[in-house]
Image (cartoon, helix red, strand yellow):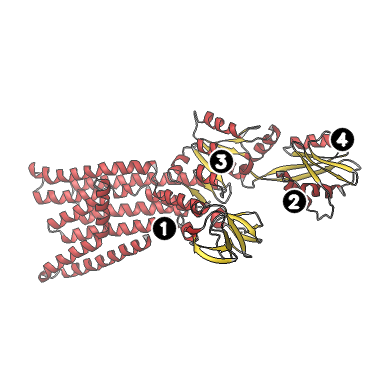
Amino acid sequence: MKKFTVITEAVAVVVATILIIIAYILDSSPREGYLVEYLYVFAFLIGGFAKAKEGIKATIEDKSLNVEILMILAAIGAFIVGEFSEGAILIFIFAVSGVLESYATQQSEKNLTALLKLAPKTANKLEYDIIIEVPIEDIQIGDFVVVRVGEQVPVDGIIKKGITSFDQQAITGESMPRQVFIKDQVFAGSINLEAQVIIETTKDPKSSVMQQMIDLVEKAQKEKSPSQTKLDVFEKWYVYVVIGMAIAMMILPPIFGIYDQETSFYKGIVILVVGSPCALVASISPAMLASLSSAAKENILIKSGRYLEILKTIDLVIFDKTGTITTGKPEVQNVVVAKDYPLYPLNSIINNMELQSTHPLAKAIVDHFYISSSLEIETSEIPGKGLEATYEGVLYQIGRFESESDPYLEKRADYLQKQGQTIVWVHANNKQVAFITLKDTIRKEAVDMISYLNTCRVDTLMLTGDQRETAHNIANTVGIKRYIANCFPKDKLEIIKQNQHNKKVLMVGDGLNDAPALTQANLGVAMGTGTDVSLETADMIIMNDDLSSLPYLFKLAKKMHVITTQNIIFALSIIITLLISNVFLDLALPLGVIGHEGSTILVILNSLRLLKQKK
């Protein structure tokens, strides 16, 4: 619809241009006087219709005048004094500026609205072994949906039948396909790449992750930043000031004998044009939209432009360690076996026991050993302790069990634990026989990210539930200045509140157990997506789970601030210069129009530079 509007406005401008050119050519012939005037009037009506409609509608809705009304009054005033060509050219240039502004807005919104095109409209519902194509709105929680190869998942759900891989780039920003199995979760908008699957829906279509993202994007486009809101209030009052100045110029100079009536009226019309705050009004909104669009292109969802304004004031960035500084996926670092104790079949026994466990560390251990074993060991899970199994008359235990210690293993374990590694003990017949160390891997981009923040003199603080040794090791590795160990989720909220007494705080978390902290902070940034919590509580969501996006956001916020400041200073300078020139010099209306609208176009083009901001 917006694209159609831009095309319509552009066509109107082209038609108005042709009419003005014809009128200008005919103007040299004295016989064609009335025809020339009619052509200028038609050019005025055709070229100015869109802006006039927009201005009148806004005036009725807001119950206040605006810049469009100023332009219309100025053009009508030009016609009254017989300056038909200048009135038509005024509206023509104003219309050209409007088309360029609409085009710039459309370009800025292109990346933001990309999700709208991806949203599926229908779904293949499975009923009594029959596939029926139904509107997406008819799908309910618990329905079974068939997704063929190449099709999009219509609504969030879990795999009930089939194994395949999905392209989730539209949702997570991750370019690598994700393989899914039965009971795995999939999100609406993901594209099936390999084989047909059946999905059981777990959400209403209106509540899917994709739909929530679409709603947030639409809200972000409509919401104004604090600076833009202040500028809008200023515009409403400023318009009346300009009208007052124009009326004063038309009335006062003739009274005091400075200018004659015709000259004063003409200068009043020029004031309506050059005093109009078009460039000033366009100083912030296009820059904000371009920034949101640029961020969306880098797989970052920003809920509102005002959060970019807050970002440039941040003094302290607080990180939740797990899933933020680290990947949240522990990996086995060492397997240490007691002297003279055989590794085989111990490794197969450990692998088999861990296969039957649901503990978060079990998967990492299984992935490390990666043994295809024919051993059949019945394993029991002892709450608060770990795993227990008997094989060939030997009692094996993995976890926190009391047993006879091994001095060699104890010494090695103590050393590795001080390096920040987690110890998992293995016992055989109540004796320590081995231990496994695991470590949550640090994100490869974390060091550069922290280095950038330190360079910008932004304080950093890491919160973790780990022991002090582990916290110290990770903080020291990445360069974080401060850390708090043994920190529970409930403590994060209080820590943020304490720091907010003298600092503006940004909290970075995974959006899962950080919801209260993300909400409390001046700015909340969630890593990754796919959770309702992160979409609801975070102000910014880094969908591709890439920490290098954080320095990018700081740079984007800084550049947006610089550009909007440039725009405002430039716009005010042009307005003041043109007003002074009009009062003390003979400023022609077309020159005033070119100066005024030219400044608006330059301000918009300056804002569009933000579209090219990259990491």
- Image x and y of residue 19, in percent: 22, 68
Residue 551 visible to the viewer: no
Q: How much space separates mark 4 and mark 1, taking CA atoms? A: 68 Å
Q: Are marks 3 and 2 in contact (CB under 8 Å)?
A: no
Relative to 391, is 44 on the left or the right? left
Q: Point out the frontmost of discs 1 and 2.
A: 2
Q: Residues within 10 Å of mark 4 (few under 14, many from 20)?
A: some
Residue 367: mark in rendering: 2
| In the rendered image, the vertical position of residue 434 relative to residue 206, given as above or below | above
Residue 107: mark in rendering: 1
Q: Point out the frontmost of discs 3 and 2.
A: 2
Q: Earlier in the sequence, mark 1 or mark 2?
A: 1
Q: Quadrant of the N terminus?
A: bottom left
Q: Earlier in the sequence, mark 3 or mark 2?
A: 2
Farthest residue in the front direction? 128
Name the residue at 15% across, 54% down: 77
Q: How much space separates mark 4 and mark 2, taking CA atoms? A: 27 Å
| In the rendered image, the vertical position of residue 2 relative to residue 610, given as above or below | below
Q: Earlier in the sequence, mark 3 or mark 4?
A: 4
Q: How much space separates mark 1 and mark 3, taking CA atoms? A: 30 Å
Q: Secondary structure at mark 3?
A: strand
Please tell me which residue lies in front, 579 or 423: 423
Residue 533: mark in rendering: none
Residue 508: mark in rendering: 3
Q: Residues within 10 Å of mark 1 (few under 14, many from 20)?
A: some
Give, as a three-letter code, the residue at label 1: Gln
The residue carrying mark 4 is: 406
Give, as a three-letter code, the residue at label 4: Asp
